Amino acid sequence: MDNKGDYEASLKWHKKCIQIKNETRLINNSSIAYNYNSIANVYQKQGDYKQALEYYNKTLNLFKEIFGENHSDIAMCLNNMACIYASEKRYSEALECHHKALIIKKSHLPDDHFDFSATHNNLAIVYDYMSQFDLALEHFNVSLTIKSKSTFINQLDTALTLKNIDLIYEMKEDVLQAKSFYKRAAVIRHHILSATHCDVIQIERDINRISIKIK
């Protein structure tokens, strides 16, 4: 789905599915919950955060009713809600949702599971928005550690996390640490991308900029 017509058609289809399921009562509530979640996803992509949150809350309530408080799909829903709250600068609510999702995931997955890298990355981004740089660094570093051990992670994603870390060090005016992480990100980008790729050019500019500050 990449245009308004597709989004509207998807919304219409999912809402019709819910209507039919409610009328026939032949499908269990979990099926309706997933329809609610799909509707919320569409509204989120459209930037209609009010409607998206309304349907994520419907999803969340049904999931809790069906699965209890500790199901992995509840963590998924909470993460989606947190991203909307962050977009609306409702950072405390975003943190609450991400932390709840993290607690649920910890009851299902080993500590170094690659799914945790995204949750810690999201927490770091919210703390960064709030200018709580030490907490942002803490979660970015946890995310980075998990990514470094995982075979499922795209190395360019690791480079992006490294760059996020060096940006925070730069804001903290710790230019030596910033340069160290910029160089680590550069190694990955040079290894994967061509020398003329915009991301490679940008990271070299970043290194040059931070090097001037050190001098």
Image (cartoon, rainbow, N blue to C red):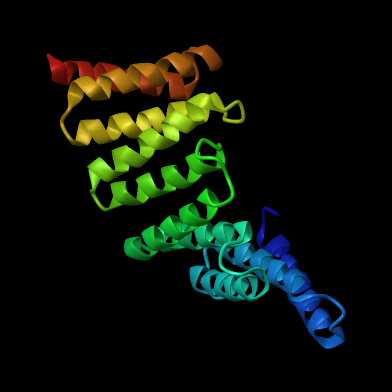
- 53 or 75, which is in the foreground? 75
Q: In which quarter of the image is residue 69?
A: bottom right
Q: Which residue does the image show at 42% across and 63% down from the upper left?
A: 85
The image position of residue 151, as x and y in percent, is 60, 26
Residue that appears at 79% across and 75% down: 28
Q: Which quarter of the picture shows residue 142? A: top left
Q: Is residue 62 visible?
A: yes
Q: How many marks?
A: 0
Image coordinates of residue 163 in percent, x first then y, are 37, 29
Residue at the spot 40% in from the left edge and 21% down from the top edge? 185
| Residue for point 52% across, 25% down | 149
Q: 169 left or right of 139?
A: left
- In terms of image quadrants, where is residue 192? top right
Q: Furthest-left residue in view?
A: 215
Q: Name the quadrant of the C terminus.
A: top left
The image shows residue 171, relative to residue 59, as above or below, that is above
- Could you tell me residue 108's position as x and y percent? 59, 50
Q: Position of residue 190 (x, y in %)?
A: 47, 13
Query: Considering only vertical position in the picture, is 20 above or below 106?
Result: below
Is residue 8 visible to the viewer in this orientation of the structure? Answer: no
Viewport quadrant of the N terminus: bottom right
Residue 154 horizontal side relative to residue 7, left or right: left
